[in-house]
Image (tube, rainbow, N blue to C red):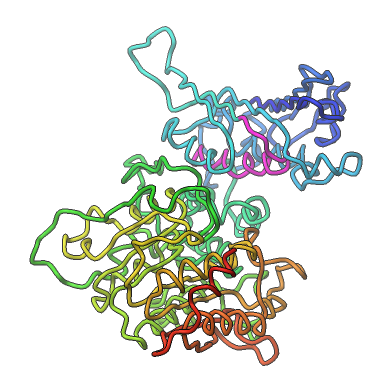
Amino acid sequence: MLLTITCTRPEGAAWPATDLGFLLHKNPERVQAFEQSYGTAHVVYPEADPARCTAALVLEVDPIRLVRGRSRGTPDFSLGQYVNDRPYAASSLLSVAIGAVFRTALHGQCKARPELALAALPLRIELPAVPCKGGAEVAERVFEPLGWTVSTTPIPLDPAFPEWGDSHYLRLALTGEIRLADALSHLYVLLPVLDGAKHYWMAADEVDKLIRAGGGWLAEHPERGWITRRYLARRQSLVRTALARLAEIDETDPDELGAEEDYVEAENGVGDITSGSPVDAPASGTHGADAADSPDSLTISARSSGSPDDDTPVRTDALVGPDAEEADGSGHSPGAPAADAMTPEHGAGPDSDEAVGRAPSLAVQRRAAVLAALGDVGARRVLDLGCGEGALLRELLADRMFTEIVGVDVSMRALHIAKRKLRVDRMPERVAGRLTLLQGSLTYTDARLRGYDAAVLMEVIEHVDPPRLGALEHAVFATAAPRSVVVTTPNSEYNTAYESLPAGKFRHDDHRFEWTRAEFTSWATGVAQRNGYHVQLRPVGAEHPEFGAPTQLALFTKTEAPGPTGEDTKAAAR
């Protein structure tokens, strides 16, 4: 097996490309060998000059050593270990070698060049043979969301017989400006995922390996459910635990991490990604964040064929797809807050929780609180502002009380994913007719959003830069001016309860701020007074005696005598 990592010095940079050797902790002037249980890993530098440096990891696999000590009764014993071509294609063997040979680099540590360890570098990674039964599309869909430009070349079954077609192996090249530690973690996780197999027996500590290597990017990856299942060989107990661990820091519902209906298992037992609808929009942005796109640049109207007489309510389980139960988490994560300090963030879905006596996850409780608030004000025509991939839309559709539902997000990609997850194309016509998806930024006024009963900003405002909150206020409360507005946001005081959250760190990397209860109260009160609303504050989640609830909710309702909605909010927007 061969892996090459090439670093090209940017024009004007003060450091030479050969500093790649410092980051990898391997001297370019030496050839080094590292014994593994299944063979020998060699590190060499085919080129090393100030402008360009390439490090090569060559894994020489000994098939005999690979199976030595295993009896015929062990799960991974097979004569194929001796005679097949797998020792020459990137697999979990290469992933393990990366973890062993480049361990310090994988952790992002470099005492000699600490500034480079933190910097995004111009990198090119090449692998001459990668098993990938889904073909180039699968490789692109797992690597491109991570910032890579992907180039693939199919490898023919036999060049002498072109009529036989291509094999399921690819020549893979990745280019991008990415931190070296992140690049290695992508390879460490995704090579065995593309292969769909591992050379060793799976144990419970595989979840820890996945979280350590992918914790910084996997939870936000659009193919995260499929990646997790493939990495853990579809062992459901491990998959549930991993998805729950990824969801534990408040921002993601375990249901959302696993309910990807577009991932199916092929007849040969290896999962391939199939696309229900094209997802060719730019990378997903942050819900509610500012963007240069015009708010009226595109409208997606969700319509589909179906029985015109079918007005039955849409069930949640009918919308999330057959993999929904795989997303249910269970147990307590070592990184989660103490049981007496919180409601578990990683519980199973509502039905399962009730059946086994566990409390639902915070994400489930948050959506329930929003639905309850909408019910309290009798809303029927609802805006979901910053709808993301459609978690709340799914539940709004499941309740026939809501006759018109509009999801708005700045990210076209998120809207495409929402449309796919909700199975819009398979909905009865009268159900799909209640839903419209719009692309738009919440810091711009939009005439399409006027006249609705209620608007929801669920975990949105904390993604907006504080100087732009005035613009959001003017666009939502003064211009769209729905009769009611529901806003939820994290309670920063509660962050102390999360053992895995370092002091002073936000719950999500894209958060621009996180407010205490007093700060949220002050903002909500000011918004209400300036725009003619009354506001009621509610806790969401189990309350801690000192920190309060993990999420705080504000329910704004229009008063009879509107406040100074015009000049005050325009001044705030400016």
The quarter of the image holding the N terminus is top right
Q: In the rendered view, does 572 fall on the left or right side of 239?
A: right
Q: Is residue 519 magenta?
A: no
Q: Which residues are magenta?
A: 175-197
Q: Which quadrant does the C terminus fall into? A: bottom right
Residue 407: percent from the left, percent from the top? Answer: 37, 62
Query: Mostly what secondary structure, the magenta segment?
Result: helix
Task: Tell me if residue 98 comes above or below residue 552 in the rendering.
Answer: above
Determine the residue positioned at 42% across, 53% down.
295
Q: Nearer the viewer, residue 237 or 104?
A: 104
The one of 311 and 516 positioned closer to us in this rendering: 516
Q: Position of residue 312 (x, y in %)?
A: 17, 72
Q: In the rendered image of this protein, does residue 270 appear above or below residue 8?
A: below
Give the residue at x 76% y 48%: 107
Residue 459 falls left or right of residue 404: right
Instruction: Give the left or right position of residue 182, taking residue 302 as reference.
Output: right
41 horizontally vs 130: left or right: right
Can residue 71 be seen in this snapshot? no
Q: Nearer the viewer, residue 520 or 120?
A: 520
